[in-house]
Image (cartoon, rainbow, N blue to C red):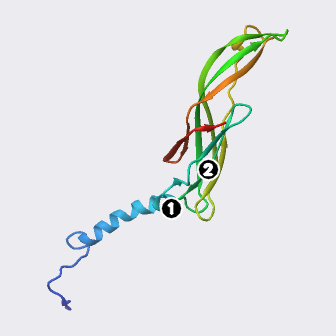
């Protein structure tokens, strides 16, 4: 019967068949499935804003936020969410043209958009929020017209993935 000689008797066999898995190999093998299951963009992604986003109030009361993100992978989708606290007054105009003092409202204007990164992992975005609205209950009867005035904005929060920025609205 042929017996195999060991060239290096000071080293143990590293086989998983004899005496269990080799220590050096087990660490690498247990980490491999974790890395394989991650999306490519999370392995290299360091999403961040380039400069500060710019928020501008529109004539209808909505807010448009523009900016640039970097650190995404090639051709990756990302959703940008915008939230703007707002306070405004709703006056009521009757059919004769007279305006009755209105009610103060507070709320949050929101907007979102999904954008795809370019080949360098950058995204240029522009998201517009909803405009403030008045409900029919703001005026005494349906023949009166609600008028929104004195709109005041809080700081805009722009969120993209796990990063966010807060900026002020420019008029």
The residue that label 1 is drawn on is: 40
Q: Residue furthest right?
A: 96
- Kindly state the secondary structure of the residue where label 2 is placed: strand
2 relative to 121, above or below: below
13 relative to 123, above or below: below
Residue drawn at (35%, 63%) of the image:
31
Q: Is residue 158 left or right of residue 8?
A: right
Quadrant, the N terminus: bottom left
x%, y% of residue 73? 55, 61
Q: Is residue 148 left or right of residue 154?
A: right
- Kindly state the secondary structure of the residue where label 1 is placed: helix
The residue that label 2 is drawn on is: 67
55 or 7, nearer to the observer: 55
Residue drawn at (20%, 92%) of the image:
2
x%, y% of residue 125? 64, 50
Mark 2 Cα shell of 10 Å, populated few (<14), some (14-19), many (≥20) = some
91 relative to 31, above or below: above
Q: Quadrant of residue 21?
A: bottom left
x%, y% of residue 13? 21, 79
Mark 1 Cα shell of 10 Å, populated few (<14), some (14-19), many (≥20) = some
Residue drawn at (71%, 22%) of the image:
148
Quadrant, the C terminus: top right
x%, y% of residue 154? 57, 31
């Amino acid at each position: 019967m042929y017996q195999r000689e060991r060239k290096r008797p000071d080293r143990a066999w590293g086989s998983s068949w004899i005496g269990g898995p080799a220590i050096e190999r087990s660490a690498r093998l247990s980490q491999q499935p974790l890395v394989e299951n991650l999306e490519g963009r999370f392995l290299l992604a360091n999403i961040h804003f380039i400069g500060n986003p710019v928020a501008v109030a529109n004539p209808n009361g909505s807010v448009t936020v523009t900016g640039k993100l970097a650190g995404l992978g090639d051709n990756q989708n990302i959703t940008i969410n915008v939230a703007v606290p707002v306070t405004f007054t709703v006056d009521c105009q009757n059919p004769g043209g007279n305006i009755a003092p209105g009610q103060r409202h507070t709320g949050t204007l929101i907007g979102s958009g999904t954008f795809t990164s370019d080949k360098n992992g950058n995204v240029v975005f522009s998201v517009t929020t909803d405009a403030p609205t008045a409900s029919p209950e703001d005026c005494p009867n349906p023949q009166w017209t609600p008028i929104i005035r004195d709109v005041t904005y809080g700081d805009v929060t722009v969120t993209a993935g796990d990063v966010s920025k807060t900026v002020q609205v420019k008029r």
